[in-house]
Image (cartoon, helix red, strand yellow):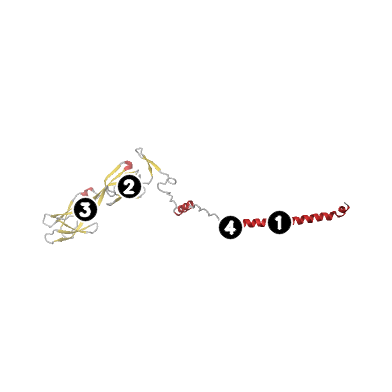
Amino acid sequence: MEFLKNNYEKVILSLVLLGLAVAAVLLLTSVDSEKRALEEIESGIIAAKPKELKLVDLSTNEAALQRMLKPVSLRLVGEHNLFNPVQWKRMPDGRVFPLRTGREIGPGALAITQLTPLYLKIEYEGPGSGDAQQYRFKVTREAEKSLSKRIPTTFSVTTVGGKAPVFVLKDMKPKENPTDFVLELVDNKEQVVVSKDKPYVSVAGHTVDLRYDPENLKFIGRRLGDSLVFAGDTNKIVAITETNVTVQATSTTKRTTVAYAPAP
């Protein structure tokens, strides 16, 4: 006991050193063991055959890409009602209908039912009676606005250069007892040949028959310059051709052309 009392510090130090030595040996053993385990794991990973990756389904992505390449066209005008609410119109007879195109009422709703040509006719009637030599021509002007001027009227000219309201006599053939007459039209300076068997006939205008369905109106035999009253406004016919009619609103001076679509 006396020995321990005198050397207990050395004994404790010896025990500590012994413990440290044992710990060092155990640590080295553990490191070697862990190293071998890691090497085994690593070799197993390297040697193992990798699994094939499954193909990723990209169909939805491709479909989205195609939609981006062909974007949807949004209709923000016309019959698209989100930004263009449809107006409804009540007619005097109580009918109610939507205004989708803007041509359901007003000039756009006019329809041509018939176009009739109006002719300018010049016919040689023969020499006139009397002492002076005269050449008589019957003129029919169907396109004249005045009713009195539409009536067939006979005009007489005596010599080359003689004038009538519609034409000027430019030449006669043969000189003696002429049968062919060269006439120059006053309106367009066109020269035409008229004989007993060959009258001059040309289209000088048209009359038009129209209907306006929203008010069940019909306009028959209307001419250039005539006025049409419908949809609370007056529209004047400012042009008529063989294919369309143009009207002009009195209130706005806006012009609308109505195409003629004859029945097949």
Q: CA distance from mark 4 to mark 2?
A: 95 Å
Q: Quadrant of residue 39?
A: bottom right
Q: Which residue is mark 3?
A: 120
Packing grade of label 4 (10 A; few <14, some 14-19, many >=20) is few
Q: Earlier in the sequence, mark 1 or mark 3?
A: 1
Q: Nearer the viewer, residue 200 or 112?
A: 112
The residue located at (68%, 57%) in the rendering is: 32
Q: Tag 2: residue type?
A: Asn
Disc 2, SS: strand
Q: Is residue 71 left or right of residue 131?
A: right
Q: Earlier in the sequence, mark 4 or mark 1?
A: 1
Q: Which mark is residue 29?
A: 1
The residue located at (73%, 57%) in the rendering is: 25
Q: Which residue is mark 4?
A: 47
The residue located at (32%, 46%) in the rendering is: 110
Whole-percent x, y for residue 203 in the image:
23, 53
Q: Earlier in the sequence, mark 1 or mark 2?
A: 1
Q: Is residue 77 left or right of residue 226?
A: right
Disc 1, SS: helix
Between disc 1 and disc 2, the foreground one is 1
Q: Earlier in the sequence, mark 4 or mark 3?
A: 4
Q: CA distance from mark 4 to mark 1?
A: 27 Å
Q: Earlier in the sequence, mark 4 or mark 2?
A: 4
Q: Which residue is mark 2?
A: 235
